[in-house]
Image: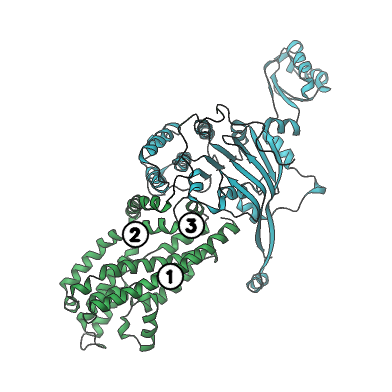
Amino acid sequence: MTASGSTSAAGPAPGVTPGAASGPPVRAAHRHPRPWRATLRAIPTLLRIGVAETVAYRAEFVIWMLTTSLPLVMLGLWTSVAAEAPFRGYDSADFVAYYLSVLVVRNLTGSWVSWQLEDEIRRGMLSMRLLRPIHPFLSFAASHLASVPLRGVIALPVAVVLLLSSGADALTRDLAQLAWLLPALALGWFLSFCILFAIGALAFFLERSSAIVDVYFGVFAVLSGYLVPLTIMPAWLAAVAQVTPFRGIIGIPVQIVTDPSLGPMGAARLVGFQALWAVAVLLLLSWLWRRGVRRFEAFGA
Amino acid sequence: MITATALRKEFQVSRRPPGLRAALASLLHRRTETVVAVDEVSFSIAEGERVGFLGPNGAGKTTTLKMLAGLLHPTRGQAEVGGFVPHRRERGFLCAITLVMGQKQQLIWDLPPSETFAMNRAIFDVPVREYKDALDELVTLLSLAPVLDKPTRQLSLGERMRCELAAALIHRPKVLFLDEPTIGLDVEMQLAIREFIRSYNQRHRATVMLTSHYMDDVVALCPRVIVIDGGKLLHDGDLRTLIKAKDPDKRVSCLVPRAVAEPDVMPQVAARLAGLGEVTLEGARLRLRLPESRLAEVIGILLSELRVSDLSIEDPPLEDVMRAMFRKPAASQEPARDASAEARE
């Protein structure tokens, strides 16, 4: 049997009048001359659904929050080290300021998107996202961004404790410098999200990208300043940390808050550093994503 | 509305014999081979048609649907849906189609279905009034009112499937690719979904392409069927013509009177009918399989001589026709299709 011609012998469905729709009109296919406008209009709803999801997954959310409490352990360790004399210029108050700031920044800039993306790629569920007229990066980003205010619920009390503690003395009071904190946090979140999204996208090529996430967290914890302030690291390691993107996620926002010597221009330069890395990581991610989706299309979607 | 021209899809599948040595060897050198999932398939479907897409497991049905929905890039050949090249996944194309896969869900697991509907409204940029109309229609046709605000995880399989359909149709797509939409559902729910698909097709003049292991779905919904096996197109045309071509015999079923069903009488009846067709008797139920040309003669005998009741005449079940089509003679049997290709189905 060979292929048919243009229509079947059966013709259109019973009850259907050729050439005239019998029900409400189906939407025109070429309706969106500016797709980005439609995407922008979708963002508020995606954020609202993201909040609903975060609230629904509250147990997982709280557990994830608890996993970010490592700075408190480090705080206990370093304050005891610095109890008698400052360590490389850091006294107890400096450590309190540093680690409480790290805790706040980590809560606001962390992400778990790589696990979600890996899971969706492995189980083929990404197909359903690819069939929606919004880039999966944007839909994941909106969903994750929506959880940030809820993370603030945890970050805020820590920030209050910081302001009331001995660490308050070690914080900068230069408002012009502090004005750079918000963009620094936003870029920190974006960098972290992009890097973890790129690692999740490796599942297009590898059986399990979660193994890469483990390696990433090891490197991240050291080079971002999450474990130890970059300024008390060995010089060669601090030099590496200075040029890698990881300090953009933790170290830079923390430095803007805890380094009075930085000044507004210094803070601006650090935010510029974050922005450069954000562009670089986004370009890398976009290349990786295109190749990955092509592979997904070739190997089974 | 849908055109496939010499569509072909090949997959590279890795091969590894069992055992530790093979596992270690595969670290250095991975053997792969090419599996042809869809082989030069061509067809064309007009706007408003409902077409059944049939074939055994691993035949290439889902692969073809995925190529038409834009999820898979064809190795060769061309696909066109509503004037779009599917794999480019342009916004206009994505707004015009939907793909429902019975085994993959798009509902947000921990939120009520109404949230997924709202999300799809925003993503597909459906104006609020159109959304309300579409939602009202879907809620009525699919009886969704009681489940709209329950978390998806608490819904039964049937309720979830109805919500999946609604989520997939909230943007009123023009082309529906339905891959096993009734899988795992009970008979009542299958009927409800079937009825809904027919109604959607008629209301919106939507084009429907359906795969299902339940032949009743296909018989009830699809005047036209496309049959593929081993990635190759075997038949494209009217369902009744297919059935007639592959198995022209009619099935007659009737109840014989108790006196006729007696062991000493029945052999004579069977002998009387034997030359006319295949006869089986289960209790008082007499079944015959016979050519259409003999139908009038046999019905005459059954009614006038045997005085049967509850008489029905039917085409052969589609399952039987399919089974016969896909049964390959041992000599011409192709190598068994790759397991991974089946898994893709």
Classify 10 Å Cα crowding around label 2: few (below 14), some (14-19), many (20 and above).
many
Q: Position of residue A245 (x, y in %)?
A: 39, 75
- The color scheme shown is by chain
Amino acid type, callout 3: Glu
Q: Which mark is residue A281?
A: 1
- Residue under the image location 41 percent in, 57 percent down: A138
Chain with green colouring? A
Of all residues shown, which one is farthest toward the front? A33
Q: Is residue A262 left or right of residue A290?
A: left
Give the distance between the C-alpha atoms of the residues marked 3 and 1, in whole angstroms.
22 Å
Q: Position of residue A139 (x, y in %)?
A: 41, 55
Q: Which mark is residue A223?
A: none
Q: Is residue B3 left or right of residue A94?
A: right
Q: Is residue B135 left or right of residue B213?
A: left
The chain that hosts pointer 3 is A
Both marks 3 and 1 on one chain: yes
Determine the colour of chain B.
cyan
From the image, tell me which residue sits under label 2.
A145
Amino acid type, callout 2: Leu
- Disc 1, SS: helix
Question: N-terminal of the two: label 3 or label 1?
Answer: 3
Foreground of the two, A8 or B37: A8
In this view, A197 is above or below B37 = below
Give the distance between the C-alpha atoms of the residues marked 3 and 2, in whole angstroms.
19 Å
In this view, B20 is above or below B131 = below
From the image, tell me which residue sits under label 3.
A120
In this view, B328 is above or below A144 = above
Q: Is residue B284 visible?
A: no
The chain that hosts pointer 1 is A
- Residue under the image location 68 percent in, 45 percent down: B42
| Mark 3 or mark 1, whichever is nearer to me | 1
